[in-house]
Image (tube, rainbow, N blue to C red):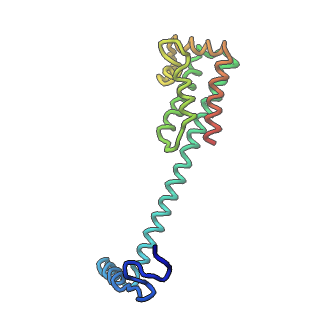
């Protein structure tokens, strides 16, 4: 074990001066190669690092805007979806169209985002698997962009059943609210 004051590999920095000539020569050569005036190489490196930091800051700010798109589209979807609780809108093609468009906005905003969306994915899974029995799910019909004066009968049936069983609407809305809290 080496003690303080003893040399390491027969070299002790207190006995000799540390030489920096080679490092200085390399820096001077880089300045010459880049066509910079003497002493400006460090300024070039500093400028590069500052620009890189600024660019990274801008990128992180842009990524902060992405969750707001997701939050806004999720709020819009939940607002439209909650209307089904008060009124049977299963045969209203305008309602189906608004609901489908809001669903697609959520899906698109998630694709554009670069942040973890675990609870939001759970909510989408809940819609994609509701009802448990049936040929296609609520999420499937929402993704078809139902509306435009066309509503598939099974989709109308799912919406009617949701209106009649308000507990199911509340469960799905709770999933969305949990996702909103996680994103906020």
Residue at the (57%, 25%) spot, across then down: 99
Residue at the (38%, 86%) spot, across then down: 19
Depth order, front residue of 46/15: 15
Counting labels gives 0
Give the side of residue 118 with respect to residue 86, left or right: left
Q: Quadrant of residue 36?
A: bottom left
Give the side of residue 170 with respect to residue 158, left or right: right
Please state the horizontal and vertical placement of residue 67, each as a whole percent of the image.
56, 43
Residue at the (48%, 16%) spot, across then down: 136
Q: Quadrant of residue 181?
A: top right
Residue at the (47%, 12%) spot, across then down: 135
Depth order, front residue of 140/13: 13
Please state the horizontal and vertical placement of residue 115, each as a whole percent of the image.
52, 44
Kindly give the residue lying farthest to the left in the view shown: 33
Depth order, front residue of 130/61: 130
Q: Quadrant of residue 182?
A: top right
Kindly give the residue lying farthest to the right in the view shown: 86
Depth order, front residue of 169/84: 169
Please state the horizontal and vertical placement of residue 10, each as a whole percent of the image.
37, 82
Q: In which quadrant of the rendered image does the C terminus lie? A: top right
Position of residue 8 relative to residue 167, above or below, is: below
């Amino acid at each position: 074990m080496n003690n303080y004051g003893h040399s390491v590999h027969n070299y002790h920095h207190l006995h000799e001066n540390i030489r920096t000539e080679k490092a200085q020569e390399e820096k001077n050569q880089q300045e010459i190669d880049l066509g910079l005036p003497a002493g400006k190489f460090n300024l070039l490196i500093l400028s590069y690092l500052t620009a890189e930091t600024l660019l990274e800051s801008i990128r992180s700010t842009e990524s902060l805007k992405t969750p707001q798109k997701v939050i806004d589209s999720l709020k819009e979807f939940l607002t439209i979806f909650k209307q089904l609780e008060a009124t049977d809108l299963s045969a209203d093609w305008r309602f189906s169209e608004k609901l489908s468009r809001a669903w697609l906005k959520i899906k698109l905003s998630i694709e554009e985002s670069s942040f973890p969306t675990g609870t939001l994915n759970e909510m989408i899974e809940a819609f994609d698997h509701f009802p448990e029995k049936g040929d296609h799910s609520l999420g499937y019909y929402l993704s078809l962009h139902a509306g435009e004066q066309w509503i598939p009968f099974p989709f109308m049936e799912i919406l009617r059943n949701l209106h009649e069983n308000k507990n199911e609407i509340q469960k799905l809305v709770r999933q969305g609210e949990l996702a909103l809290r996680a994103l906020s």
